Amino acid sequence: MTVTRKSHNDLPRRNGRKTVHDLLQKIKELHEENVKLRSLSLIDNLTGLGNERFFWMQLETEMARTKRTGHSCTLMMIDLDNFKCLNDTFGHLEGDKFLEEFGRIMHDNSRSTDLPCRYGGDEFALIMPATSVTDALKTGERLKNIVADMPQKSNPPVSLSIGIAEYTAFSPYSMNEFVRAADMAMYEAKGGGKNQIHIDHNWKQITFEDSEVNRDEKDALFTDYR
Amino acid sequence: MAENSPVIISVASGKGGVGKTCITINLAASLSEKGKRVLVIDCDLGLANIDIMLGINPRRNLKDVIFGDVDVHDVVIRTEVGFDFLPASSGVREMAQLLHENIERLKDIITQISQGYDYVFCDIGAGISDTVLQFNLFAARNFVIVSKDLTSITDAYAMMKTIYRTCGKTSFEVIVNSVRDDDEGLKVFNHIDSICKRFLNFSPRHLGSIPFDEVVTRSLMKQTVLVRLFPASGAAVKINQIATAISP
């Protein structure tokens, strides 16, 4: 897609004069182009971290890398507990200040190979290539403790609910399933009382029907065997 | 340091009592005799008994590494039969029901200690607990030991199905134990193979069959390995053949 920059000289004229209608039309077009330009960006304006678009692009790359190299990739989904309370009590400017600060914390506390992103609203994600769950846990604990120790205006204070999922070369996960697994673990952390970390237990995702030896299989196992 | 990265092999059976641990230590001893650097890890964490089979009484074990601050290298024992051995504890409930974090830690420990070996055998407990599944997912090669009993065949199939459904893994290598002769071993394998093909759409590999041999019991009573004590016995010959198939 190409987006051309427009200046006021390009504005339409009727008999050499601009009409109000033309101007409004042009403003609308410029606005639409700006929206397009913003959607092409990979950086989140407020925090400077990767945005959601960046997140999906990088996740795809890293999952493909895991399949090729065998090094597992770990994904951390982070939700800010009680953030709405901060926003409602002290206003959106304070809320934005907190998001900015947390963006800086994520940036400063991840390794150079990690990919910190703002997934949207008050949800953040950390893609950790070639990282085991044990190492991801250490990073998660560090982030959680830094936020817990921050001086905060709102009560209850903002804390972190973190979900971690691992993608190995043998993982059955699609990209969406991988994100959902980390999300589910994050919701478990929230449901478990907030300010904590949960890990996805991928093998629990299979149903009884998936793993149980069914009647047909038993028939085949027993009757064909003499 | 080993020139190649270590091959981590899980040895599981589904059903207990089919000779899994006995086969593990004998394969390890056989590969050691071929000059390979081999480590055996007792991954039957709550009910470990490789130490008993080898007549060793370890002072420390994996429990002290996971829950204490003991270095894993200080727990490894050099056995008289050529391979190194990392013991686990018996009768410790916390080990039988490891939390996910601890399993992850254990996998990191195994990755760390495996450097410098050619083959690392993880002797996994019976059943299809989370720990059993985790070790199967973790290992590059997955050995499945079965006997000719229908219960053993069914449990082995159930285990393979669960692992396959969990992670899509199909890299199973089957050893049939306690058979009358090669024909019977092949018949048991073909039966498992036909059911895997029909219902799961994959074919495991037949690594070999080991005949029932009364000298196996005698080697166990002497607390040593069969391939060293009775190298000419039918079972020892087959184990050596399987070791060659593992590492041609």
Image (spheres, rainbow, N blue to C red):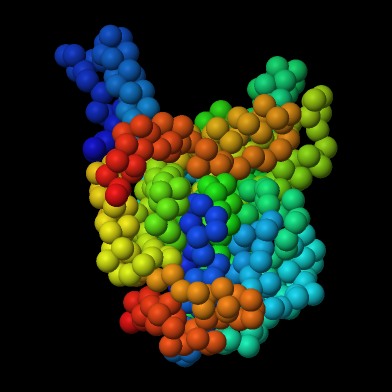
Closest to the observer, B216 or A163: B216
Which one is nearer the viewer's eye here, B177 or A131?
Answer: B177
Taking the image as shown, residue B3 lies to the left or right of residue B193, namely right
- Image-based side of B136 in relation to B247, left or right: right
* Residue A94 visible here: no
Q: Which residue: 71% across, 48% down?
A: A141
> Residue at coordinates 33% horizontally, 18% vertically from top-left?
A28
- State the image quarter where residue A83 is shown: top right
Q: Residue at x 28, y 59 (%)?
A: B187
Q: How many marks?
A: 0
| Residue B12 visible to an observer of this rendering | yes
The picture quadrant where one finds residue B115 is bottom right
- On the image, the x and y values in percent for residue B105 come to 65, 59
Q: Is residue A41 above or below residue B125?
A: above
Residue A15 locus on image (x, y percent): 16, 14
* Quarter placement of the N terminus of chain A: top left
Nearer to us in this view, B100 or A159: B100
B66 relative to B210, above or below: above
Q: Is residue A125 above or below residue B248?
A: above
The residue depicted at 74 percent of the width and 51 percent of the height is: B93
As drawn, is B41 to the left or to the right of B93?
A: left
The residue positioned farthest toward the left in the image shown: A15
Image coords of residue B148 (percent x, y)? 39, 57
Position of residue B80 relative to residue A213, above or below, is: below
